[in-house]
Amino acid sequence: MHKFMLTALGAATIAFASPVAAQDSPLRGGNFWTVAEITIDDGYTGEYADHLAGAYRKNIEFSKSKGWMRNSYILANVNKRAGEPDLYLVTISDHVTTPAEDEAREKELNAFLATTSREQDKQSGARAKYRKLGGSMLLQELLYKR
């Protein structure tokens, strides 16, 4: 019983201490950056570049026009080491979406692209023959309060 009370007291302390600590911090949360790692098989760089300049760009530009995305970047890993990806695809948004937002956006994007989620999945599978999606990260930008 004593351990339980100490655990509960510790949890309550952490729960109430976190907001206070955040108030004292000189930093505040900013935009969210999603970073996807892409590795391209030898001989397919041009083909993947065509995809990025075509369907991928169309998707990105539509998302920006809707305010779903603030910006995006395609970053090349110039001094690639063994095991590292060739490209990083970065998208920046002001918040993490909810499942309901994801569903609504998917419907709107599919209508704009005149496609379905299944067709997009099939196209992604075709690219998977030469393009490998490694890990992805969700990062939050920290900004100075003052």
Image: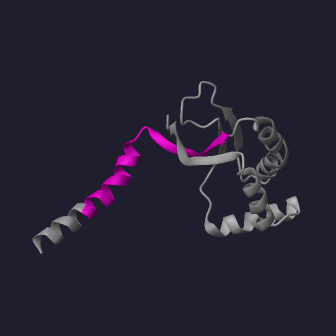
Q: Is residue 36 left or right of residue 145?
A: right
Q: Is residue 28 left or right of residue 57?
A: left
> Relative to 133, does residue 79 appear above or below in the rendering?
above
In the figure, residue 120 lies in which quadrant? bottom right
Determine the residue positioned at 79% across, 47% down: 56
Rendering coords of residue 146 (x, y %): 49, 34
Residue 132 or 92: which is nearer the viewer? Answer: 132
Rendering coords of residue 54 (x, y %): 85, 45
- State the extent of the magenta-drawn residues as a range: 11-40
Q: Is residue 110 left or right of residue 125?
A: right
Rendering coords of residue 18 (x, y %): 35, 53
Determine the residue positioned at 81% across, 47% down: 61
Is 129 in the magenta?
Answer: no
Determine the residue positioned at 63% across, 30% down: 77
Q: Residue furthest left?
A: 2
Q: Residue furthest bottom?
A: 1
Residue 66 or 60: which is nearer the viewer? Answer: 60
Q: Residue furthest right?
A: 114
Determine the residue positioned at 67% across, 33% down: 75
Scheme by which the image is coloured: one colour
Quarter of the picture containing the N terminus is bottom left
Residue 116 or 133: which is nearer the viewer? Answer: 133
In the figure, residue 90 lies in which quadrant? top right
Q: Residue furthest top?
A: 79
Rendering coords of residue 64 (x, y %): 77, 48
- Count every numbered label the image shows and give the total: 0
> Relative to 107, does residue 50 appear above or below in the rendering?
above
Q: Is residue 94 left or right of residue 137?
A: right
